[in-house]
Amino acid sequence: METDVPRRPSANRRIRAAALSARTAVQRWPWYLQVLALWLAARLFSYAVLAATARFQPAGPWFDASPSYWSFINIWDAEWYSRIFADGYPSSVPRDAAGSAIENEWAFYALFPLLVRGLDAVTGLGWDVLAPLAATAAGFAASLVIYRLFRLRTGHGTALWAVLFVAVFPVSPILQIPYAESLNLLLLAAALYLFVSGRYLAAIPVVALMCLSRPVGVPFALAAGAVLAVRFLRRHRVDFPAGEAWRLTALTAASGFSALAWPVIAWVWTGDLRAYTDTESAWRFGDLVPFKPWLTMSQHLFDPLFGPVALVLLVGAAVLYLTSAPVRRLGLELQLWCAAYLLYLLVFLNPQTSTFRLLLPMFPLALSTAWLSPSRAYRGAVAAGFAVLQIVWVVWLWRWTQLPGGGDYPP
């Protein structure tokens, strides 16, 4: 006579049950713990990528072969920020024998190194400790603000996925490196949150600080002005109270003035009206001529005939994307911010390998990417693809490799 013996669950079933139980437990956490846990996992992944790449780093301008993680992240522009932390800004723009400005500290905005200097005055821990900690902490704070911004437009689950896309974006290691990107991301997200919420006067001091962290004031003022114009033109269909119009006008004007703050500070400090613009030109090997660098680069990559055609196709593709349904769902403010920032890059940017890093302020597009499909398989594939490209970015651009003609591609 047979006896029924209870079957033990298979290993796969036990693993799936454990994973489901863990996911259910995490879903019970408050939203901010979920966001911070997700961001922590992404930063640990970036740490692993950077630390592993450092082991295969040959000797370079900053270190011997196989530097530590802490030495490896204090290179490229981090060196410029550390100089500002230690010595401040030059009292005059350094120039060569021909009178052209050479690369100097005035190209780098002051808020991040001054923040680290303030922390050092309190703790005495120095740049090597405080700068990575400040950058990383700003990134964690930015993740919370980004989530709250996305929640203005979507539900909890989709907002979390969009935050994950930002967290593992191919250039996201920069958010734990002594650069100003994470601080700027925090202030930009806060400014956009207040902008979208209609709290225009509250956004003004945030925008003023943002404009001292990185040069994003011009596109923010352009976006605010564009929203003002659109809402004024639509006032007969959509109510636009006079008080709200004046507050938005004030934000637009304040953003424009704040965008000029750093060039004016450089002028007053050095007595040289062109201190900032000439310094920027030093990284471009020529004057700041709108649109010209993109045309020159397109002709360099292709040829004088097809280069402009390729550039027109690229701009056309960007316009089609920014007017697509998923991007329109972001709302007028975020859609116009992304459009204004992209236009700003087209007008002023010298396109090179650093362009990938400069796309980070368009982070609201992470939400439109999540909206393309609710499928976990699709969203997981996007996150995995970003993580793989993160490895590519670190190995290709952050890692120093001597090129045949000298130097290396900047990250």
Image (cartoon, grey):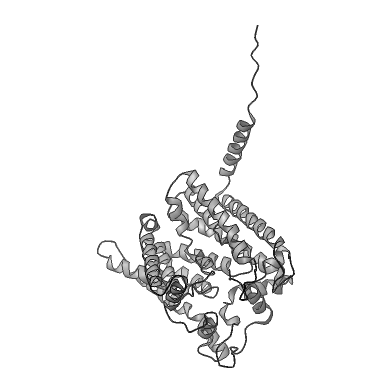
Position of 309 compared to 362: left or right? left
Which residue occupies the foreground of this view, 238 or 104?
Answer: 104
Residue 329: give x, y in percent of width and height.
38, 55
Q: Quadrant of residue 64?
A: bottom right
Image quadrant in which the N terminus is located:
top right
Q: Is residue 197 visible?
A: no
Residue 149: give x, y in percent of width and height.
47, 58
Position of 105 compared to 58: left or right? left
Which residue occupies the foreground of this view, 324 or 335?
Answer: 324
Q: Is residue 262 visible?
A: yes
Residue 234: give x, y in percent of width and height.
28, 65
Q: Residue at x 64, y 19 (%)?
A: 6
Check the image and name the residue furthest to the left: 236
Q: Quadrant of residue 249?
A: bottom left
Residue 374: give x, y in percent of width and height.
44, 45
Q: Residue at x 43, y 68 (%)?
A: 342
Position of 374 compared to 177: left or right? left
Image quadrant in which the C terminus is located:
bottom right
Which residue occupies the foreground of this view, 197 or 295?
Answer: 295
Q: Residue at x 28, y 68 (%)?
A: 233
Count of numbered badges drawn on the protein: 0
Position of 156 compared to 63: left or right? left
